[in-house]
Image (cartoon, grey):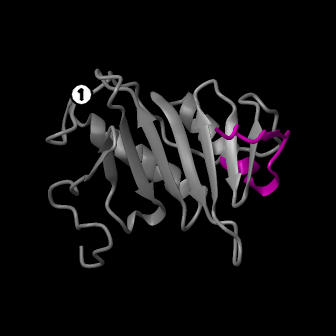
Amino acid sequence: MDAEPDIEMVDSVGELDRVVVTLRDFLHRSPAARAIAVVSRGPGEEAAVVDCGRFEAIEVELGDRTVRLAHDAQLAAEPPPLPDVKPIPPFEVDPESGEVAGTIGGLEHLADAVGALADALGPESVAMAVFATTDPSNPLSVSCRAGGAEPTVVAIGDRPFELPPPPGAAPPGDQAA
């Protein structure tokens, strides 16, 4: 069995420091256990994946190289303004049916917050946040693409479901609204 290669600890990821502080800020102001971003690095570069777990080292995948930063790394970048995310009790979930039960409007609130996070990360970005449920083996994740051009995806454990648009709202990507 091959051992996992050592992952280099760094003090900064350069231009991606802004992504790190943004995810960390979102994580600390929300009930999320983890916040992840996929961000464009420019023409000819693979997208970067930044994974920020609560009180864990932050992992950054840069194509064929992965690095880690301490969760409390002091970075010069400032996070952009993010919306307040209300604390919400864990949802009850059924991964077979896709049913989510909890605070009225809670899932939509979290979807809006993750959508705002994706927008704050920049065009072509995708944000995902993972939230605890009453069933620890089936966390709830919410994924959004910047600009809202694609449906929000909610996953219960590893089962994905598209979140329908609110009543009266145009479907994502529909310009006639």
Observer-nearest of 83 and 94: 94
x, y percentage for residue 159? 28, 46
Q: Which residue is mark 1?
A: 103
Residue 41 versus residue 89: which sits nearer the camera? 41
Q: As drawn, is 154 to the left or to the right of 126?
A: left
Q: Disc 1 on helix, strand or loop?
A: loop
Rendered position, 43 above or below 4: below
User: 8 or 162: nearer the eye?
Assistant: 8
| Residue placed furthest toward the front | 1
Residue beneath the point at 85% across and 39% down: 11
Whether 152 is among the magenta residues is no
Would residue 94 be found to the left or right of residue 49 on screen?
Answer: left
Quarter in which the C terminus is drawn: bottom left
- Residue 125 at x, y percent in the picture: 54, 61
Q: Residue at x 22, y 27 (%)?
A: 102
At a point 32% along the width and 31% down the height, the residue shown is: 138
Amino acid type at mark 1: Thr
Residue 33 lies, with reference to residue 18, above or below; the image says above
Residue 61 image offset from top left, x and y in percent: 68, 52
Residue segment shown in magenta: 1-19
Where, by quadrant of the figure, is residue 145 drawn? bottom left
